[in-house]
Structures are given as structure tokens and as C-alpha cells.
């Protein structure tokens, strides 16, 4: 059962990110005012959970004071780069809930080493719109593995969440909706089928999003047929993200922001800039009826008016990705059997 009787239950991974927070805000806005809602906030650390819950509570108090008693919060400490943590999170949810209505797979991780400023200058001067749409100057570390021996970015962005869903299917069964957050940068060129764990990839983040695309198209039909779970694939477009601020100073940050606006004014539909607009596609898919056969993208006009775009995806290799992930699931089911850990301890 949920914390509030008969509440809709939403679990948002990566809730502390700009996108995660705005998913929570929009979910509250777009849910039926008469419904009770339980938001499960996730993070790797307890202090971050407390910070995020406070922000969302203040949002409810300010915008919807009449709904304060109808919106409740829970938290889940989970690190998708740690398989024991994932199993522990599963046990916590299984003890407390009978059903989860919405699951947003928003947590994402990159192994960045900084910015190639010479390369950035060249790309921006040569093609400024492409430079802020498909940047090639973000330096990503190669050869990084998790403590579980898996490719770190692969585990954080693909297999960890995939295994989490595998564990909680019974909670999502009969009406649950899963929304995977992909990226505008998920082109097939970023993925080698000889390195599915992205260990040697110089673009492991983008490769992980390509894997998410392929995983969706090889699994959404089975989830619907076997469990009556609806799965959606979305991308939020381009917006200001907290994760890369550490590599920017005041000048470079506002220069980047200016180029975002210029790109949008020149007709780019995906320079949403606002995390609120970026959250449009994820929440619309969760709350409404959208296509599962395409990638649903948050988009905006030159003036900032939001709308959705639908993108066809090349699904070549999707069944191979699915088979690989399923083999890993079997392997880790065996490794993790009888494993119980209390995530309530920070």
C-alpha cells in the first residue's frame, strides 16, 4: 500500500536534477486535483533526498495549498552503479507498496573529464548551432568500471535501471507506466556492438542513450503483453543541466545560454532551455496516451511555446541488445539471490 490510502504512486529516479525536479512539479500540476499522490524521491544520499523533498513540498505549498494533505513523500536511496543497492531498493519498495503507477528512469551519469576548449571554440565558430546541439568537445573518460565490474556508464544509465524494472515488474503490473529518458544525442554512431558496456567508448554517455533507445524497442511489446505495463521512450531536448555547471564559469555559462536562445530563435525545436519545458514529454507520456513506437520529444517554438515532436528511430540491433541485457539479468539474479540490504541507513 502507499503512504496515503488509494494514492497514485510515482517514483522518479534522479529527482535532484533539474529535469527530475520539473518532472515532479509537472506531475503534481497535471494529476487530478482530487487524487492523492505519493512521490517517491530517489537519490544516492540522504541529505540530497531531504533537500529535494523540501523543494517539492514548498512548490506544493506555494502553488497548490489546497492539495498539501493530498501529496505525500517517501524516499528511496539507490545507486544504479551498485547492484546490491538496486536489490536493496527493490526490497524496500516491496515491503511498502502494492502498486507503482509511474516510474521515470531519469537518473543518468557520465564520466566527464572536462571540456576541450580548443575543440569547443572551433566547433562553435564553424557551426554554432551544431556546437550547442551535438557538442563533440565534452571530454569523457575511457575504461571506467563500477565496483561490480561492469562498464560504469552502461550500468548507471542502462543495465542498472533495466534490472531495477526487472525486479519490480510485479509492482508495475496492470497499468504501471515506465518512462525512459533518452537524449537528442543517441545516434547509432556512438555505439559499437563489440563494446556494449561502453568501456572503451570515448562517447559512453551518448552510447548509453543509444542502448536505451534500442532496449525500448525490443522490450515495450513484451512488457505490455506479459504484464500490462506501458513503456515510453522520450527525450527532453536541450536545457540547462546542473551536472555540467562545474566545468563552466560565469562567462562561459551565459555564453552557452545565449547560444541556446539564438539556436531556438533560428528554428531549433529542441533548445527548450527550461527544465520545465524539457519535462513536457516525460510527464505527458506518463499521464496521457502517446505512441510507444516512436521517441517522444519535448520541443518549443522560437517564442518558447512548448509542444511535442515524434521521432522515428533506427532499431537495427535492438534484439541483440535485448538478448544481451537478458543474459546479464540471469547472471545477476544468480549472484544476488538472498541478498538483502537496508537502504534506510545513509
Image (cartoon, rainbow, N blue to C red):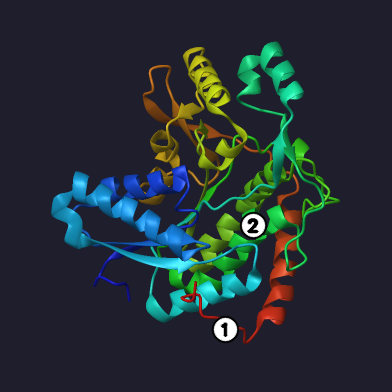
Q: Residue at x 76, y 62 (%)?
A: 150
- Callout 2 crowding tier (Cα within 10 Å): few <14, some 14–19, many ≥20: many
Q: Please state if 23 lies on the left or on the right of 8 as rendered.
A: right
In the picture, the quarter occupied by the N terminus is: bottom left
The residue where tag 1 is placed is: 340
Image coordinates for residue 30, horizontal then vertical, percent: 28, 46
SS for callout 2: helix
Q: Compare marks 1 and 2 and give the one earlier in the sequence.
A: 2
Q: Please state if 60 lies on the left or on the right of 314 as rendered.
A: left
Q: Residue at x 48, y 43 (%)?
A: 291
The answer to whether residue 11 is visible is no
SS for callout 1: loop
Task: Name the outermost residue toward the bottom.
Answer: 338
Q: Please state if 285 lies on the left or on the right of 340 as rendered.
A: left
- Residue 151, relative to residue 294: is it above or below? below
Towards the viewer: 94 or 259: 259
- Mark 1 to mark 2: distance in Å? 20 Å
Image coordinates for residue 84, horizontal then vertical, percent: 62, 74
Q: Please state if 45 lies on the left or on the right of 26 as rendered.
A: right
The residue where tag 2 is placed is: 156
Amino acid at each position: 500500500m502507499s503512504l496515503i490510502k488509494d494514492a497514485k504512486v510515482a517514483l522518479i529516479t534522479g529527482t535532484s536534477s533539474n529535469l527530475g525536479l520539473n518532472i515532479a512539479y509537472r506531475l503534481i500540476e497535471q494529476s487530478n486535483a482530487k487524487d492523492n499522490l505519493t512521490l517517491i524521491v530517489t537519490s544516492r544520499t540522504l541529505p540530497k533526498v531531504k533537500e529535494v523533498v523540501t523543494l517539492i513540498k514548498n512548490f506544493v505549498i506555494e502553488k497548490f495549498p489546497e492539495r498539501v494533505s493530498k501529496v505525500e513523500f517517501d524516499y528511496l536511496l539507490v545507486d544504479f552503479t551498485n547492484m546490491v543497492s538496486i536489490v536493496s531498493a527493490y526490497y524496500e519498495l516491496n515491503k511498502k507498496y502494492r502498486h507503482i503507477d509511474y516510474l521515470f528512469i531519469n537518473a543518468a551519469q557520465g564520466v566527464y573529464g572536462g571540456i576541450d576548449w580548443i575543440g569547443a571554440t572551433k566547433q562553435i565558430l564553424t557551426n554554432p548551432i551544431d556546437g550547442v546541439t551535438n557538442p563533440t568537445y565534452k571530454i569523457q573518460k575511457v575504461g571506467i568500471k563500477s565496483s561490480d565490474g561492469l562498464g560504469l556508464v552502461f550500468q548507471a544509465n542502462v543495465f542498472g535501471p533495466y534490472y531495477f524494472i526487472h525486479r519490480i515488474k510485479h509492482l508495475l503490473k496492470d497499468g504501471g507506466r515506465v518512462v525512459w529518458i533518452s537524449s537528442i544525442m543517441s545516434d547509432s554512431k556512438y555505439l559499437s556492438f563489440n563494446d556494449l558496456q561502453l568501456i572503451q567508448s570515448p562517447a559512453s554517455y551518448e552510447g548509453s542513450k543509444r542502448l536505451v533507445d534500442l532496449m525500448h524497442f525490443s522490450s515495450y511489446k513484451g512488457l505490455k503483453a506479459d504484464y500490462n505495463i506501458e513503456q515510453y521512450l522520450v527525450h527532453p531536448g536541450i536545457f540547462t543541466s546542473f551536472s555540467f555547471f562545474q566545468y563552466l564559469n560565469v562567462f562561459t555559462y551565459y555564453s552557452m545560454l545565449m547560444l541556446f536562445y539564438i539556436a531556438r530563435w533560428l528554428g531549433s525545436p529542441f533548445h527548450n532551455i527550461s527544465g520545465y519545458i524539457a519535462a513536457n514529454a516525460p510527464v505527458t507520456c506518463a499521464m496521457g496516451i502517446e505512441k510507444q513506437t516512436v521517441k517522444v520529444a519535448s520541443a518549443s517554438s522560437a517564442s518558447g511555446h512548448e509542444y511535442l515532436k515524434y521521432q522515428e528511430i533506427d532499431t537495427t540491433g535492438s534484439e541483440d541488445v535485448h538478448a544481451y541485457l537478458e543474459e546479464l539479468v540471469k547472471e545477476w539474479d544468480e549472484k544476488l539471490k538472498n541478498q538483502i540490504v537496508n537502504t534506510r541507513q545513509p
